[in-house]
Amino acid sequence: MIEKKNTQNDRKEILTTQQGHPVTDNQNVRTIGNRGAMTLENYDFLEKISHFDREKIPERIVHARGAGAHGYFQSYGTVNGESISKYTRAKVFTNTSVKTPVFVRFSTVVHGNHSPETLRDPRGFAVKFYTEDGNWDLVGNNLKIFFIRDPLKFPDMIHAFRPDPVTNVQNLERMFDFISMSPEALHMVTFVFSPWGIPATYRHMQGSGVHTYKWVNEEGKAVLVKYHWEPVQGIKNLTQEEANEIQGETFNHATEDLYYSIENGDYPEWELYVQIMEDGEHPELDYDPLDPTKLWYKEDYPWHKVGKMVLNKNPHNYHAEVEQSAFGTGVLVDGLDFSDDKLLQGRTYSYSDTQRYRVGPNYLQLPINRPHTNVATNQEGGQMDFRQDYHTDKNPHINYEPSLTGGLKEAKNPGKEHQPYVEGHLQRQAISRENNFGQAGETYRRLADWEKDELIRNLVSALSGCHKDIQTKMIEMFYQCDKDYGMRVEEGLKQVMQGDSQAIHKTNNQRENIGHVSDPY
Ligand code: HEM
């Protein structure tokens, strides 16, 4: 037998400490005699156990359970047959020859890391585009709307949805207590308690930016846009019973599905669509176009296909890439802009704030978060600042701007600035066109019969454990959405409260299509 040479490659396979010292015994600590005691100079052991003690970072305050994948996005360059540059100068859209690398993280919202992936909950759909102009994050959900429209309500809403602070058990009475006092949530509740509240897998769900954003062109002119991801795999949702069955076997089905599809070369794809509205208040509509609890119906504002995303690579390491990834709604590139949506503006502060705490002040230097373009900034220092390329300028002493003698310079403005004109009194007031029930009723009417059955069954089951006052208030609001909607919840609850717990299972329209569902929204 030929003896193997000790090559450079072999050295790479040898276990070392973090200081690079080869580990010759990874089974036994150093002791006086083989029974102990241990001595304090067991440096390799102390280092190993101290690092282990710190392996976890705080989990996300919401969306803690997630799965991620790498891939690319490519723009088609047109909107409804016209050049996309008519609407936006963002290079990620105008440059059709580039496959922009992306990292996507899908998630559930309310419960902690390792909670079951079968839970009724919106799903997060966050995409980081590493564009030639720096990062763009589109931090969306699977559903196209949200529960609330004012960011001041977000912490209370999440508290109500989360487990009770005393028992640590989720209690839907707390959730409906909050919702019964937040009529704007009725539309989202209608989606979440229907089969749309449990997507079958991450690959079979849509994604949506939810908020209204802006696109800005070369002349600085803006239009309002909404983004939607459509899964090429089709949309599939689960009934509560199907979800229960899956949960009996595994609580990781969505992560497994995503990981092994990619591992087996069956790469999931989504097409990106935008809806476009002229910039303005649109008094002709019975809703405010900036209201994130509202849909822009397809028949009024068609979905225009603008590009495709393919996920073709699994992360090498979950913690480094998925857990430490950091998305935020403030992360936009030239040609894309915020709208005045209050919820969007409230979110925009929250994300990088929590990431400085959750990951650290230099979270943007981690490979998963750093842009794929040159980063040259005078923002420096802080824990774990490990940049090698501190000052690309010839004079590394100049870490400020402006300077006559050197340092980094401001870039030229790539196009005319979009300068919206705003005026008004500084005030605390809800928007004028709240219209909390109109679209919720329409969404109910557009559900297929089996989806309606599921919705009523899930609502009745959830509300049956709630205080009478909450039930009454919720029924009253369902009536305001749609008479049939209110009647069915009221009737179902009455039967269940009278002891006929099977009543809600009796009227069961057959599911029309076991496979994919169509999207009338
Ligand atoms: C995660 C705040 C509304 C989608 C988070 C995180 C915070 C947060 C603090 C954790 C981020 C991290 O640790 O990296 C808020 C606030 C909201 C709001 C204050 C409203 C005022 C929304 C809405 C959507 C959404 C409307 C959907 C359009 C997401 C997603 C994640 C997330 C997808 C997970 C991102 C990831 O995978 O890392 N949110 N959120 N959030 N949020 Fe929100």
Image (cartoon, rainbow, N blue to C red):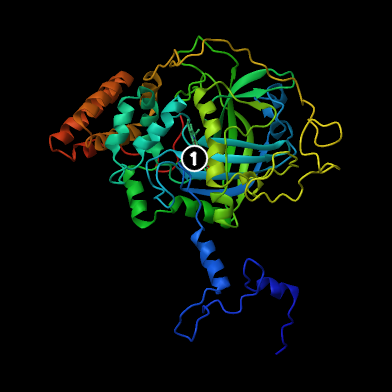
Q: Residue furthest bottom?
A: 1
Quarter of the rendering occupied by the N terminus: bottom right
Residue 73 versus residue 292: which sits nearer the camera?
292
Say few, some or many: other residues with alpha carbon within 10 Å of mark 1 (under 14 / 14 to 19 / 20 or more). Answer: many
Q: Residue furthest left?
A: 498
Asked where in the image residue 188 lies, by quadrant, the reply is top left
Q: Is residue 46 left or right of residue 516?
A: right
Q: Residue at x 57, y 38 (%)?
A: 352
Q: Residue at x 23, y 34 (%)?
A: 466
Task: Say if 397 sits above or below 30 in the image.
Answer: above
Disc 1 marks a residue whose amino acid type is Gly
Picture coordinates of residue 395 (x, y %)?
85, 42
Please, what secondary structure does the residue beneath circle 1 have? strand
Residue 444 versus residue 419: which sits nearer the camera?
419
Q: Residue at x 81, y 42 (%)?
A: 397
Q: Residue at x 54, y 26 (%)?
A: 345
Picture coordinates of residue 129 (x, y %)?
64, 40
Residue 366 versus residue 29: which sits nearer the camera?
29
Task: Identify the residue position indicated by label 1 in the image.
Answer: 124
Q: Residue furthest front?
A: 40
Looking at the rendered structure, the number of numbered marks drawn on it comes to: 1
Residue 231 appears in view: no
Residue 431 versus residue 91: which sits nearer the camera?
431
Asked where in the image residue 104 lies, by quadrant, the reply is top right
Task: Say if 410 sits above or below 123 in the image.
Answer: above
Q: Is residue 443 left or right of residue 350?
A: left
Task: Say if 498 sits above or below 39 in the image.
Answer: above
Cβ of mark 1 under 8 A from ligand 1: yes
Residue 438 appears in view: yes
Picture coordinates of residue 124 (x, y %)?
49, 40
Picture coordinates of residue 291 (x, y %)?
48, 21
